[in-house]
Image (tube, rainbow, N blue to C red):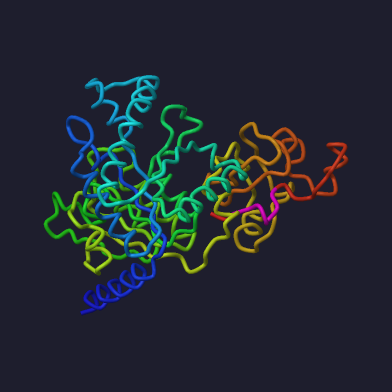
Amino acid sequence: MNEQIEIEKGLYYRQTLFDKAKRVVIKVGSAILTAEDGMNLAVVQNLAKEIAFLHDSGREVILVTSGAVAAGRRKINKTQENLTIKEKQALAAIGQACLMNHYDIAFDFFDKKIGQILLTHSDLSDRLRYLNVRNTILTLFKFNVIPVINENDTVSTQELKFSDNDNLGALVTNLIEADMFICLTDVDGLYDGDPQSDPYAKPIYTVTEVTAEIEDMASNSKSILGTGGMQSKINAAKMVAAGGGSSFIGPGRREHILRHLFSGEMVGTFFLPRKDKMQSRKRWIAYVLKPKGTLVIDEGACRAVSRNGKSLLSSGIIGVDGNFEVGDSVVCMNKKQQRIAVGLSNFSSGEIFKIKGLRSDKIEQVLGYKDVDEVLHRDNLVVL
């Protein structure tokens, strides 16, 4: 009886949020875009049809896609499995034009215009470029054009790469404050057990909060292809929830999948948004920037930062790791190596090494100067 009530409640929340969603980001990965000989053109065509359906309903839609390397393989018949980074970059250069040509033809059939945006992580980690990307997307919306976003694999190195396109999709969702992030993949959704070995495994239709228990369930739903996997999709949903958006993970090859979703069918796994929406700038600090160092802080500093909303002072720092400059992102950890917070540093790693453990009124005496008291100011600090 209680289970039925929960299902009905989940259905109500899902349908309400689907009905209200006016700006939607759809991410499709290589797991469903790829066929044995390259791109799965039937999936591309179905995807265009479904997105056109959403667009015709008056919604603003963004497509975040993988597939450039797969398209490049198909173009030059490159079947080698173990590719070097240079070879992948070259295949992406070949395949990017093919990929967009496939999309252009597919969307044109439904009288839809598309615009391409290629991104690297540095485009979002720089605050000004981050806002410029947002402005470009919003202008494409004004032109009634559907943005198609992909990582610029032709130039991406390890430092410039997003961890995967799930991460990219979530970042774009928060960037434009979209209402919903839809992740189409090769699994049906999240299960409370392994459906391949446990006949009693049940699908999880609605997740109110991403807890440790939910994260543990990620191993029960295995994706065959792609760099993400279920864990990265749950992390993406968690990121979107912090921005006040909802997320969906479900089967991307299913015909009419978006129509079924928006008409209320219980398919896949739906993640509800957090009630306490994080500020835009703090989302940028927490999820976009890659930390360049670590500060180990004592118990008193942990309490002050995580419970009392205080800034981090030099007196609470007991260790410094990494080489970073003023303004770089750093992670705060406790003695047990648990992540407590992340923020922008007002001092370099060398300066912090000299002043760690000291009261703020001793900083000038040690460094010969002092612009601020706080190592991490609470306005530039996000509790994890």
- What percent of the width, then of the height, locates residue 297? 64, 47
With respect to residue 283, does 44 lie above or below? above
- Residue located 26% across and 62% down the image: 204
Relative to the observer, which residue lies in front, 354 or 230? 230
Find the magenta span and give its range. 376-382
Tell me the quadrant of the picture where the N terminus can be found.
bottom left
- In x, y percent, where is residue 30? 28, 39
Residue 22 is a magenta residue = no
Residue 334 in view in this figure: no
Instruction: From the viewer's side, name the closer residue of 352 and 325.
Output: 325
Q: Which residue corresponds to the image point at 28% horizontal and 21% vertical from the top-left?
A: 82
Residue 344 horizontal/vertical position (percent): 65, 46
Q: Look at 48% across and 54% down and name the residue there.
A: 174
Task: Please identify the quarter of the rendering in which residue 203 is found.
Answer: bottom left
Q: Left or right: where does residue 225 sit relative to residue 144?
A: left
Asked if residue 148 can be seen in this view, the reply is: yes
Q: Toward the viewer: 123 or 239?
A: 123
